[in-house]
Image: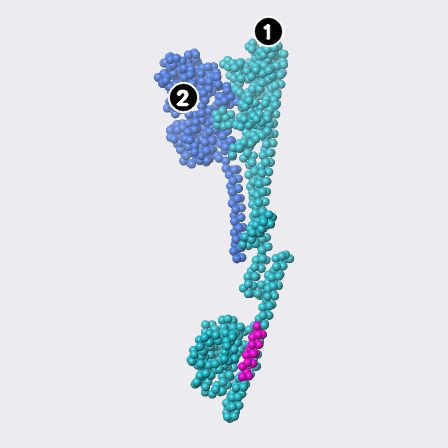
Amino acid sequence: MKQHFKKRVQNIIWHFKSIQDAILLPFLIVITLALAVFLLISLNYTEKTVLRNSEEYTMQLIEQINADLDSYIGYMETISMMVVGNPDVSQYLFGDDENQEEMKDKVGQQFKTLIDTRTDICNIAVLADNGKMYLNRGKSALNPNADIKDMDWYKDTMKANGSSVVSSSHVQNAISGAYTWVVTLSRALLNPKTQEKEGIFFIDLNYSSISGLCERVSLGDRGYLFILSEDGSYIYHPQQQLIYSGLKTEWNGKVLEQENGSFITDEGNNSKLYTVCSSRETGWKVVGVAYLDELMKDREGTKTLYGLTALLLSLLAIVLSMFISRAITKPIRELEGAMIQVQKGKFDNQAVTARGNNEISSLGNSFNIMTEKIQQLMDENIQEQREKRKNELRALQSQINPHFLYNTLDSIIWMAESGKNEEVVLMTSSLAKLFRQSISNEDEVVTIAQEIEYTRSYLTIQKMRYRDQLEFVIDVDEDILKCHIVKLVIQPLVENSIYHGIKYIDGKGMISIMGGRSDGKIVLIISDNGAGMEQEAVEHILDQKVPNHKSNHVGVYNVHHRLQLYYGQESGLKYKSVRGVGTTVFVSIPEEERQPKDGKV
Amino acid sequence: MGKYKNSKFYIIIAAALGGLLIVVLAFAAKSWQSRGGKLDVIYIPKVQDNSDFWGSLALGAQAAAKEYDINLKIAGPSSEGDVEKQNEIIRQSIEERPDAIILSPCSYTESTEAAKQIVKAGIHLILVDSSMEEPLGETLVCTNNTEAGKKLGELLRKYLPEDPVIGIVSHVRESSTAMEREKGLREGLEGYEDRILPAVFCDSDYDKAYKVTQQLLEEHPEINAIAGLNEYSAVGAARAVKDMGLEDEIVMVGFDSSLEEIQLLEAGIFKGIVVQKPFNMGYLAVQKSVEVIYNTAVDPTVDSGSEEITKGNMYTEENQKLLFPFLAK
């Protein structure tokens, strides 16, 4: 399994066109993945932290509100205890007629003190079923058009077991001429004589002190706060009218389920964080509503920061990994380039620079050693070839000389016997010239002029030997005379022409040597009017092993081979021959005056 | 080969840098938008005061402005009916180049020119409460007066005495609200059309309402039901009925609310009233203006609703907020 996986990975890696890509891509994938994971984790963490902080902050705020509300209600509760527990009140309401006015004054005094000290008290009153009552400072009257006994808070209080009842927020219409938004705390009054609920005490807390408290709280630009009573009716909501008209809904079901805590609504862009805190005094639920997108305002900034950091990092990673992969593969690419050059046969100056001491540099070193060795071997090979050519040349020189020498010496003897002194001198001097030229000159290459001169000496000797049977013409352009040519090219060809061509014809033999430039090459043409050859013989004349009647034919192959060795495949001999008409051989060599590397042979 | 590799290398770097630039720009644009990109809306009411109606309307508008997180500016004349002053405010507001202007035109005819300028300046125009003779504005947020009139008619119908003769005290002759409410009222009183006397008009003045009601009652002593079609008409008529000692003989219904009207309702002189919902009107106007700015399809008219109030339901949780929008009366 592991092996299989390894193979697959390798397959993938070998799929890339370059090692650089093979290194780069996994590198990038790993870095990008790491960054993405980092980004997600950080964002998630930040989001959670922001949310938790907001929850805590909101909770603190609404707990404060709750505490304020509780202290209001608690204060009213205290007042209600004071008033209800005040014997003057029950004496005034339910007592005998004796001290009526005195008791009333005492009650009034108490109410006045309370109203004076607390501006948030709107109304304070005691009412008895028997019609006795005390309202505020004693000057207010009940609303004649409204029956207090029909009012919800009155009914609730009478139902309760003597304990105080806190109403929801409402418009107090019990007092004539005043319609004020209040929260009413009320308590039934017992007639001490009958132990029956025969009256009521109520105190109205100005609603503006509650709503003011809520309005002051800031939960972002859009957030708000509302208060629900235990039964789900609204004590305070900034958009109460919209709710009643159905233009807006609150998550009351969920809010009422909560004692203290928070939840998040899923409303897309309008998702909100609801934080609920219940009051122990009243059972009211103070609810803070904050818009998530506002809470997460910082998140945008953090997101931007994180995103930019990640982007910069990945950019840096891309650039770095590209540089690294390039640095790693650079010597490999150098090696590759050098190898391509070696493949083409260029061995010199291909050494790669191997820095450091790693696998690739040792590879480079090995490559350098290898190319050096190959270069050395090739140099040796060239040297050997040159030696071989030199030997061949020597062989050629020694091959032609003895045979020709006997004949020539025979001719000289014969001429001397005939008393042809002049001719003996010419022939002997020509022979001497011929030998001097061939022996004295150790160079593999001679000028065309030298080569022609040599041939001329040879031809002169041959002409004298064959008397009028041989005639020759040499017509070589002046300007190529200074050019160089491999030694012993023309003479062997001329010799060949004589022994295989002219020798077989009756009548005068004619050899012409012409030379000039053609198509950027130097061309020497040696033609005879000898016996000529069959087409088949022409085709095979340059082959190495041609069965031939005369051993000297080897000379043609030898010349051709040496020309090709020295000048390359482009150069060499070319034969044209027609049976009974003659043979022409074309020698072509490159024009440029090429000096062999070593100069001397 | 080497050259090709190099150019590929720089293309990748250039692409990465380009991508980075785009991302940075996008972030910058987004943060610019979230900071300075709040919508600006100006509301121009008929009058800027603390009256129940206009005050509630402004509160509703502010509530929506907070909810939709826009900059809302409210600027209106200090007395109702000051067309000149309102037109001047309109011109000033155009110069501030807000995204939208919400307008409660003072006049059915004389506000048209200024309103046209708003549209011409390429600013979204939303009408609230009242319309104009020409159909201007992308939407009109107001009480469906025909519907409200019908409610009033149906309410009155429940209390109609035998052999009813019904008088109507209306506010301004030929005004759209008066005509629509009267039409609705007659629909609500279907079957009694021949029992309805022609409406009298008070030009939104208590004293005139008092007088025309007195006249009407003198001319038609057989009247046993009266409907007032706005607050002035209703209260003026009720005062007249009360002063003539006819409150037990005449069944009355009214429109809109005021402290006096509420007290008359409590006292049983009004059997019921129909009230508009100015808070909702203001809220809806701002909400629609945001929708219009964002090219959401908006109905040409938006009903902000109305409610029937009787003595029995006036102190319910829902209704007391409508009748007493503010903390103290």
- Give how far across and how far down residue A161 sits, in percent: 60, 15
Q: Which residue is most to the right? A: A357
Q: Is residue A82 placed above or below B115 in the rendered structure? A: above
Which residue is drawn at the image coordinates 46% and 16% (left, top)? B264
Which residue is drawn at the image coordinates 44% and 81% (left, top)? A531
Tell me where the magenta segment starts and ends, as one range: A385-403
Q: Is residue A309 placed above or below B168 in the rendered structure? A: below
- Secondary structure mostly taken by the magenta-highlighted segment of the chain: helix
Q: Badge 1 is on which residue?
A: A97
Which color is chain A depicted in?
cyan
Q: Which of the 4 quarters of the picture holds residue A136? A: top right
Viewer can see residue B77 = no
* Mark 2 neighbour density, 10 Å: few (under 14) some (14–19) many (20 or more): many
Mark 1: secondary structure: loop
Viewer can see residue A418 = yes
Give the chain of mark 2.
B
- Give how far across and how far down residue A221 sits, in percent: 54, 32
* Residue nearer the viewer, B99 or A291: A291
Which color is chain B depicted in?
blue
Indicate the amino acid at tag 1.
Asp
Q: Badge 2 is on which residue?
A: B150
Residue A394 is covered by the magenta coloring: yes
Give the chain of mark 1.
A
Which residue is drawn at the image coordinates 59% and 67% (left, top)? A375
